[in-house]
Image (cartoon, grey):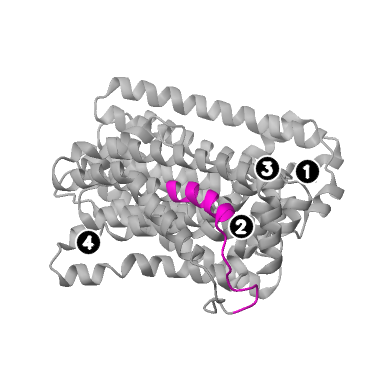
């Protein structure tokens, strides 16, 4: 622990600042935990299970996201000829001596005090605290071993961005959901249900065991105990297996160096579709023509809200408008992707890339951008509307508009490409066109997505205006129609791409 502070003075200062911030956070968390001593058992159960689950999950995911370097990586001991089993045990035991684990231990001690005050035997509270801490230690060990063995040789800025993006997609809806709850002296039903579900999972079972006893839920207590003990046993076995494998496996540095520095190409599978997807991601994140389209979509979703509010439409209804519009435009975006890629599409045709590889690879960048944006926008819109029961309906409407648009775009970009600004030109500079093919392609994809999504839109409207029971049918209808149109669009677009290769080459050479 003292050695972690060694190094340049600047790094030491920042680490000391981080430790000070962590200490303040731990004090505040412990103070809040101890305030639950006099709280009703359901309230304490919900909060402590959610907190314990979040802590366990952070130990499982945090080292991978942060790219933490384990100073006690088993690879460092490979040259010493140590037996794997004793080494695994010693490294696991040393894992208890760290600043993050001390912070978790402080939280679990406070939680044990709370449960003891709630009538749970002190021995049970202490054992569950130890169980929770041990699980966090082994999860962190496994996470760092996984990151060291699999991710670090291929770790790039893009991979780190994907990890951070995944966390944002998960955290934002959760924060929006929790902030929209109204307690009014009791645990909200949605929060209580979430705590019960987490209490039966590996990340929350140890925290739920004393709470189930405090609630006189014998069945829940036995289930939590079984899951918690099984989780600890499985993580211990996985750690032992990981150490044995690490000590008996020789790394291939040539492969690691060969894949390094390739950005997105180092992350995707070595298939035609993967390479096309990686090249598309480079375009979507660097080419101003693509970036302008991405930036305009949220603006297009919010613009109709102003006239609707002026016209007197209720604000809670207006809050639901941007999500379908953004989903529609995201599905519409790749309708002319071949034209934007005209300077490189010849590589696909001359190398005899299958149509399905081209069609699937081009949709990956759109999905990678659209899914996180919608995953954040949908909970915010639902919370603003004020009733979480409509969430499945909004999800179904967004999925239907997005997926049907992508399916139709997979056909349109092959059948009706039209001239666009060249790479390097201003995205607002549009070439002159002698026909109306561009307007036709745009209208067909957009109107087609709306028409095909009409059943889902109707069920979503009924959910808001009549009966909320239509929410779940709207979700399944939207997903079913969306995936069906997407599959059909990919199939037909693939066939057309292979049949119209000569015309695509001619278009790419003359525009």
User: Foreground mark, 2 or 3?
Assistant: 2
Residue bearing mark 2: 160
Q: CA distance from mark 2 to mark 1?
A: 23 Å
Residue that label 3 marks: 145
Closer to the eye: label 4 or 1: 4
Task: Assign the C terminus to one quadrant of the image.
Answer: bottom right
In the rendered image, which quarter is residue 227 located in? top left
Nearer-the-camera pick, 302 or 226: 302
Per the model, the C-alpha gap separating discs 2 and 3 is 17 Å
* Residue drawn at point x = 59 percent, y = 73 percent: 421
Residue 448 numbered tag = none
Q: Secondary structure at mark 3?
A: helix
State the residue at coordinates (14%, 47%): 465
Mark pair 1, 3: CA separation = 9 Å
| Residue 152 on image: x %, y % | 71, 51
Q: Is residue 345 magenta?
A: no
**Which quadrant of the view contains residue 108?**
top left
Observer-nearest residue: 396 or 353? 353
């Amino acid at each position: 622990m003292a050695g972690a502070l060694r190094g340049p003075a600047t790094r030491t200062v920042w680490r000391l600042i981080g430790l000070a911030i962590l200490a303040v956070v731990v004090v505040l968390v412990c103070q809040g935990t101890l305030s639950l001593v006099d709280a009703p058992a359901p309230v304490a159960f919900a909060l402590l299970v959610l907190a314990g689950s979040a802590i366990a999950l952070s130990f499982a995911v945090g080292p991978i996201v942060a790219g933490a370097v384990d100073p006690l990586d088993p690879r460092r001991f490979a040259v010493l000829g140590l037996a794997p089993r004793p080494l695994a045990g010693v490294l696991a035991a040393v894992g208890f001596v760290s600043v993050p684990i001390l912070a978790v231990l402080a939280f679990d001690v406070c939680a044990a005090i709370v449960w003891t005050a709630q009538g749970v035997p002190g021995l049970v509270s202490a054992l569950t605290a130890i169980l929770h801490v041990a699980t966090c230690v082994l999860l962190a060990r496994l996470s760092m071993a996984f990151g060291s063995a699999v991710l670090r040789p291929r770790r790039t800025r893009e991979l780190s961005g994907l990890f951070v993006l995944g966390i944002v997609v998960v955290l934002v809806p959760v924060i929006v959901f929790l902030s929209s709850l109204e307690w009014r002296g009791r645990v909200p039903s949605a929060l209580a249900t979430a705590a019960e579900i987490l209490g039966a999972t590996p990340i929350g079972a140890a925290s739920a065991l004393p709470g189930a006893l405090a609630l006189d839920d014998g069945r829940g207590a036995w289930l939590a105990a079984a899951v918690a003990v099984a989780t600890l046993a499985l993580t211990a076995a996985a750690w032992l297996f990981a150490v044995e494998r690490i000590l008996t496996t020789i790394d291939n540095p040539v492969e690691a160096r060969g894949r390094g520095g390739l950005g997105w190409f180092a992350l995707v599978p070595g298939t035609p579709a993967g390479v096309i997807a990686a090249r598309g991601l480079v375009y979507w994140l660097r080419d101003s023509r693509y970036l302008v389209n991405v930036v305009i979509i949220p603006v297009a979703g919010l613009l109709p809200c102003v006239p609707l509010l002026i016209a007197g439409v209720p604000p809670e209804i207006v809050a639901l408008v941007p999500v379908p519009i953004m989903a529609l435009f995201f599905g519409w975006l790749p309708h002319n992707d071949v034209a934007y890629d005209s300077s490189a599409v010849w590589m696909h045709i001359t190398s005899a890339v299958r149509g399905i590889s081209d069609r699937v690879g081009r949709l990956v960048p759109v999905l990678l951008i659209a899914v996180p944006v919608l995953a954040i926008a949908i909970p915010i819109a639902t919370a603003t509307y004020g009733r979480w029961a409509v969430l499945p309906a909004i999800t179904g409407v967004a999925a239907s508009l997005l997926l049907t648009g992508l399916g139709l775009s997979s056909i349109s970009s092959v059948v009706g490409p039209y001239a666009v600004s060249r790479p390097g030109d201003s995205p607002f500079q549009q070439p002159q066109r002698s026909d109306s093919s561009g307007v036709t392609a745009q209208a067909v994809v957009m109107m087609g997505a709306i028409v095909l999504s009409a059943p889902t839109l109707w069920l979503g409207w009924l959910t808001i205006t009549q009966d909320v029971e239509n929410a779940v049918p709207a979700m399944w209808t939207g997903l079913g129609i969306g995936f069906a149109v997407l599959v059909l669009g990919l199939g037909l677009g693939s066939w057309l791409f292979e049949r119209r290769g000569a015309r695509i080459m001619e278009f790419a050479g003359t525009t």
